[in-house]
């Protein structure tokens, strides 16, 4: 049985999430109506792979006390 890496587990969770992210700075929408002087938010699964990686690496860094 092959174990998934922590990164893969995070990615699976984020892909299933309905959280919306700014297309430009990758910040979660939260209660904001606009970000980066735009109103363009998408789900994690619709972000570019490099943006997905950036978000996951930041989450892992926060979880383990490391900053990017």
Image (cartoon, grey):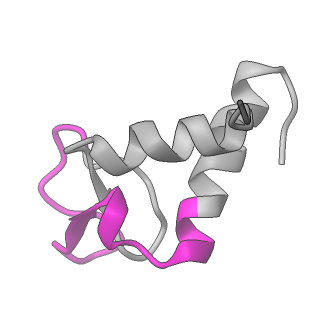
| Stretch of the chain drawn in magenta | 30-52
Taking the view exactly as shown, the residue that stands out farthest to the top is 64
Q: Residue at x 16, y 72 (%)?
A: 39
**Relative to 23, does residue 26 appear above or below in the rendering?**
above
Give the percent coordinates (x, y) of residue 47. Answer: 40, 72
Image quarter of residue 63 = top right
Horizontal side of residue 20 vs 64, given as left or right: left
The answer to whether 52 appears left or right of 1 in the picture is left
Q: Position of residue 52 (x, y in %)?
A: 53, 62
Query: Residue visible at 47% across and 79% down?
Result: 48
> Which quadrant would residue 53 be assigned to in this image?
bottom right
Q: Nearer the viewer, residue 36 or 18?
A: 18
Q: Is residue 42 magenta?
A: yes
Residue furthest to the front in view is 1
Horizontal and vertical percent position of residue 40: 20, 74
Q: Is residue 19 above or below residue 54?
A: above
Judge from the rendering whether residue 56 lies leftward or rightward of residue 37; answer left or right. right
39 vs 44, nearest the viewer: 44
Q: Residue at x 29, y 64 (%)?
A: 35
Above/below status of 61 relative to 38 = above
Quarter containing the N terminus: top right
Residue at 23%, 66% in the rendered image: 42
**How many numbered circles does the render carry?**
0
- Please tell me in which quadrant of the rendered image residue 61 appears: top right
User: In x, y percent, where is residue 16?
Assistant: 29, 44
């Amino acid at each position: 049985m092959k174990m998934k890496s922590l990164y893969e587990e995070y990615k699976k969770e984020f892909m299933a999430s309905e959280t919306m992210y700014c297309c430009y700075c990758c910040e979660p929408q939260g209660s904001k109506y606009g970000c980066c002087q735009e109103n363009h938010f998408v789900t994690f699964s619709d972000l570019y792979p490099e943006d997905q990686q950036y978000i996951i690496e930041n989450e892992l860094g926060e979880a383990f006390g490391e900053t990017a």
